[in-house]
Image (cartoon, rainbow, N blue to C red):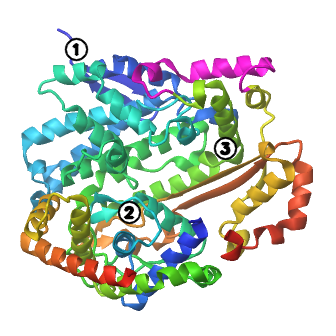
């Protein structure tokens, strides 16, 4: 008799089990392509172990998404108040349908990633298009719809799209994709800013492969204590009158939640925002802008499926050897490790004078040393300011009222100015001599 | 509009809302800015979508994070069980002072928003902001009754009669806002 359940070994989750329908997705061209998309772009040039791919991450998200789903929809963990808001949770046929949808969404949530993942996506796709747009296109493609239609009962592609990309991106992709409260909650299980399966898996996996111990936390305990909870009172006036639920945590899981948020903070500061890694992202973007036809990736699904890190890496190696090739300079910097050096880094002293100090230093350096030799990389990421916690006395309380140690640990901010290594010495002296005048904040008149 | 001017408007709004007794959590600021943008053309240009608790901007959430990182806003934890409140800083006042014309252009509008929303809790703010969202985005709903039904459809926990009250209030705000802008 044919096997109905299959297992794949995984360094994070030990075994990931999947159904025959899920294995059809695994064997599809769009999913197999993820074997050739590095999870962390060119981070392996800084952390040599970070060569893992979107393929195994997507399997991990599927696994975690259903573990979270099973915990938060377990009837013992759901109150009548929540059942009133999301009646779907009490209907076995709906629970069973959406469990299959959420696993598929976890599996498919990264199908639209460009080669080398996030690096410079905004500039390499037509305006208004993101990798989530491509993810949605692939999920809705004939090739994938055949799989959804063969299932019993068939899955609606738009249900998978909604959970895979979440409401923020869905609004950009297709304004017709309206979310019910139930769908909002389920998409939170995958892409949620606080406890999304995507985040839990990438932190654990990236930490494991990069050899950065800070990214580890007790995700078993965390997942066991996740609950669908009404929002905590947001002000004194409204009591519990703000009930639309979200994913929160029981008080016993607060330490695990803190550990996740701290892990995220350290992973950002140590790994994701590492200046050299960011410099390679810039060179990769420069290369692709010259190497790609019209400087952009195609948004056609078939063409998207043809391009992976392998084709791009082959292009980089070839261009680095040929000084007449498109993208030669950037390719050479990547291959020969002559990446731009960090001239300036966001810091509290300069920000106290002018929150836009990085931008002003970038503009002044570009004027002084010429635009081609200077780059800026600005990025910020905030964790949710709050989520609900179910206290031991059953009250719903704000996370910030039980964990103020994390108040400021949840902000990641980077503002880097890079410069061609041939200028670095001179540029450092120039910045040291002129720093105060460069970062003086503008007035209204300067702007006109 | 450059980022510092936008920051000056946001911190000004937060300060005025707190002066008018707003709790000034994230929801209060989200709804305050939504009404300022959509009713009074305050030029902050954030994209809002209908989300939990009504119109919400992920871009504005990110900007609030940046403003905290840049020391222009602080987050003040509250005793159990309440959510945190935003607090403006000395540095934010300095930034506002650098852009007197920008602030002059929006000050009356921000006074209006703070005055109308300051005393309201998140539940009322959700209803009002969603009422404005429905009014602006569903032009086919030509009467208040139709818009109330739409609002109830989008947010089933808001009763038709509460929706109607919120829509009437928004209609009144629209008239006052028009006067203010003329």
Q: In the picture provided, is B28 more to the left or to the right than A239? A: right
Q: Nearer the viewer, mark 3 or mark 2?
A: 3
Mark 1–mark 2 Cα distance, whole angstroms, equals 40 Å
Up-down relation of residue A52 to residue A1 (above or below): below
Residue beneath label 2, please? A254
Residue beneath label 3, please? A278
Q: Quadrant of residue A63?
A: top left
Instruction: Output the chain of dot 3.
Output: A
**Is disc 1 in the same subunit as disc 3?**
yes
Query: Which residue is nearer to you in this view: A367 or A4?
Result: A367
Regarding residue A331, the answer to whether it shows in the image is yes
Residue beneath label 1, please? A3
Q: Main secondary structure of the magenta part?
A: helix
The magenta stretch is A298-327
Counting residues from the N terminus, which is met first, the one under dot 1 or under dot 2? Answer: 1
Residue B106 in picture, x, y percent from top left: 47, 80
């Amino acid at each position: 008799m044919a096997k109905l359940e299959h297992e794949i070994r995984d360094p994070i989750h030990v075994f990931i089990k999947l159904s025959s329908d899920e294995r059809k997705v695994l064997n599809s061209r769009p999913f197999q392509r993820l074997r050739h998309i590095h999870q962390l772009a060119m981070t392996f040039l800084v952390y040599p172990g970070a060569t893992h791919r979107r393929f195994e991450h997507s399997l991990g998200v599927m696994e975690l998404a259903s573990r979270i789903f099973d915990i938060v929809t377990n009837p013992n963990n759901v109150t009548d108040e929540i059942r009133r808001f999301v009646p779907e949770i009490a209907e076995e046929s709906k629970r069973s349908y959406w469990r299959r949808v959420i696993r598929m969404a976890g599996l498919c949530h990264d199908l639209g990633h460009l080669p080398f993942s996030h690096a410079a996506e905004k500039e390499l796709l037509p305006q208004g298009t993101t990798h989530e747009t491509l993810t949605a296109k692939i999920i809705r493609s004939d090739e994938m719809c055949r799989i959804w239609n063969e299932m019993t009962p068939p899955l609606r592609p738009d249900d998978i799209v909604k959970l895979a990309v979440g409401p923020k991106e869905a609004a950009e992709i297709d304004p017709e994709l309206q979310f019910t409260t139930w769908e909002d909650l389920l998409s939170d299980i995958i892409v949620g800013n606080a406890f999304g399966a995507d985040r839990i898996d990438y932190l654990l996996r990236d930490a494991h492969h990069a050899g950065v111990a800070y990214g580890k936390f007790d995700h078993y305990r965390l997942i066991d204590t996740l609950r669908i909870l009404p929002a905590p009172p947001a002000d004194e006036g409204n009591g519990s009158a703000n009930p639309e639920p979200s994913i929160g945590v029981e008080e016993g899981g607060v330490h695990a939640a803190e550990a996740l948020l701290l892990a995220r903070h350290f992973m950002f500061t140590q790994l994701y925002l590492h200046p050299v890694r960011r410099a390679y992202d810039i060179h990769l973007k420069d290369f692709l802008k010259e190497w790609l036809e019209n400087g952009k990736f195609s948004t056609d699904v078939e063409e998207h499926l043809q391009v992976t890190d392998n084709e791009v890496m082959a292009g980089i190696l070839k261009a680095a050897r040929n000084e007449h090739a498109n993208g030669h300079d950037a390719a050479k910097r990547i291959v020969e490790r002559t990446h731009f050096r960090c001239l300036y880094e966001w810091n509290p002293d300069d920000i106290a004078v002018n929150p836009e100090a990085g931008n002003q230093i970038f503009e002044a350096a570009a004027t002084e040393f010429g635009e081609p030799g200077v780059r800026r990389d600005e990025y910020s990421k905030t964790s949710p300011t709050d989520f609900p916690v179910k206290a031991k006395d059953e009250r719903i309380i704000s996370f910030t009222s039980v964990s103020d140690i994390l108040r400021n640990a949840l902000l990641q901010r980077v503002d880097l100015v890079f410069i061609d290594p041939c200028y670095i010495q001179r540029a450092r002296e120039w910045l040291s001599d002129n720093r105060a005048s460069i970062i003086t904040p503008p007035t209204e008149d300067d702007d006109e | 509009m450059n980022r510092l001017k936008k920051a000056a408007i946001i911190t000004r709004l937060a300060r005025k809302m707190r002066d008018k007794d707003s709790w000034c959590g994230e929801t209060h600021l989200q709804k305050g800015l939504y009404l300022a943008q959509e009713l009074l053309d305050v030029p902050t240009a954030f994209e809002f979508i209908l989300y939990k608790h009504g119109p919400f901007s992920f871009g504005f959430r990110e900007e609030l994070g940046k403003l905290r990182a840049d020391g222009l806003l602080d987050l003040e934890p509250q005793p159990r069980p309440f959510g945190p409140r935003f607090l403006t800083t000395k540095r934010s006042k300095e930034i506002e002072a650098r852009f007197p014309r920008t602030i002059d252009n929006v000050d009356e509008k921000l006074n209006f928003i703070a005055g109308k929303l300051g005393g309201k809790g998140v539940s009322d703010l959700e209803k009002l902001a969603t009422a404005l969202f429905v009014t602006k985005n569903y032009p086919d709903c030509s009467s208040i009754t139709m818009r109330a039904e739409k609002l109830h459809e989008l947010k089933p926990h808001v009763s038709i009669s509460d929706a109607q009250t919120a829509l009437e209030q928004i209609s009144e705000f629209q008239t006052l806002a028009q006067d203010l802008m003329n």
